[in-house]
Image: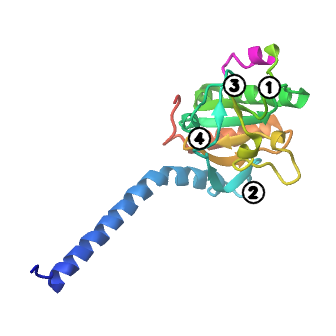
């Protein structure tokens, strides 16, 4: 027969389990602290009367691991490959009408306006249909390179969402290096105001973000 643990042994075991749980929570808190601190600094600790121009997404929305992505050549791409840098995301059909072209131009110019911080931001264009991308658009997106991927509009709309009453393609979306969608620009945004938003956000996240993937 096996002897049962006495009350003292059971109490010690319970304490060890509790200590283990607290240590695990402490590790998680340490990992999350830089992100929480950067957002808190950007959105809360600021001079009275200063507000962000773009819309903060609360709570943030994680990049779906099963979001179907493929290159223009049809090769499957894991969604996790997008993590590692700030993403400035544009959405549109492959034919790219005038409004699409305008957003892609803004996306490109906005990244360049970040100056020495521009390498911390990737431009991503998510194409929501099978339409061919015109050669002039491909050429414009090649320098500096833009990540162009096709995806399902239905699947994408379960992650990214525009302002009420607006189309999914009407805005730009900002995703942090952990794959969290955390900000949405207004339709037809003011570049100067949007630039200030990004500058403040990159400055606040300097302690945990770095250039390159």
Q: Could you classify mark 2 by the number of other residues whose Cα lies within 10 Å: few (under 14), some (14-19), or many (20 or more)?
A: few
- Residue labelled with disc 3: 112
Asked whether the beta carbons under mark 4 and mark 2 sit within 8 Å of each other, the answer is: no
Q: Is residue 140 magenta?
A: yes
Residue at disc 1, secondary structure: helix
Residue at disc 2, secondary structure: loop
- Residue labelled with disc 4: 203
- Residue labelled with disc 2: 49
The CA span between labels 2 and 3 is 28 Å
Residue 44 place in picture, x, y as percent: 64, 58
Asked whether the beta carbons under mark 2 and mark 3 sit within 8 Å of each other, the answer is: no
Asked whether the beta carbons under mark 1 and mark 2 sit within 8 Å of each other, the answer is: no
Residue at disc 3, secondary structure: helix
The CA span between labels 1 and 3 is 11 Å
| Res 1 quadrant in image | bottom left
Q: Is residue 125 above or below residue 1?
A: above
Q: Is residue 150 magenta?
A: no
Residue 168 place in picture, x, y as percent: 81, 43
Report the mark closest to the observer, 4 or 2: 4
Q: Earlier in the sequence, mark 4 or mark 1?
A: 1
Q: Earlier in the sequence, mark 1 or mark 3?
A: 1
Residue 95 seen: yes
Q: Earlier in the sequence, mark 4 or mark 3?
A: 3
- Looking at the rendered structure, the number of numbered marks drawn on it comes to 4
Magenta stretch in the rendered image: 137-147
- Residue labelled with disc 1: 105
Report the mark closest to the observer, 1 or 3: 1
């Amino acid at each position: 027969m096996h002897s049962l643990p006495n009350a003292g042994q059971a109490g010690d075991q319970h304490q060890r389990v509790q200590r283990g749980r607290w240590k695990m929570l402490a590790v998680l808190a340490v990992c999350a602290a830089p992100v929480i601190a950067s957002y808190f600094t950007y959105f809360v600790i600021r001079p009275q009367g200063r507000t962000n121009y773009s819309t903060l997404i609360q709570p943030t929305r994680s990049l779906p691991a099963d979001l179907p992505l493929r290159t223009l050549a049809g090769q499957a791409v894991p969604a996790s490959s997008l993590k590692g840098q700030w993403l400035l995301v544009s959405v549109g059909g492959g034919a790219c009408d005038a409004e699409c072209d305008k957003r892609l131009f803004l996306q490109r110019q906005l990244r360049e306006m970040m100056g020495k911080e521009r390498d911390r931001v990737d431009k991503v264009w998510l194409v929501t249909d099978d339409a061919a991308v015109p050669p002039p658009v491909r050429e414009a997106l090649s320098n500096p390179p833009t990540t162009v991927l096709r995806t399902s509009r239905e699947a994408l709309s379960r992650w990214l969402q525009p302002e009420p009453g607006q189309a999914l393609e009407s805005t730009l979306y900002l995703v942090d290096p952990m794959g969290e969608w955390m900000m949405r620009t207004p339709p037809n945004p003011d570049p100067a105001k949007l630039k200030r938003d990004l500058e403040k956000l990159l400055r606040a996240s300097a302690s945990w973000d770095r250039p390159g993937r």
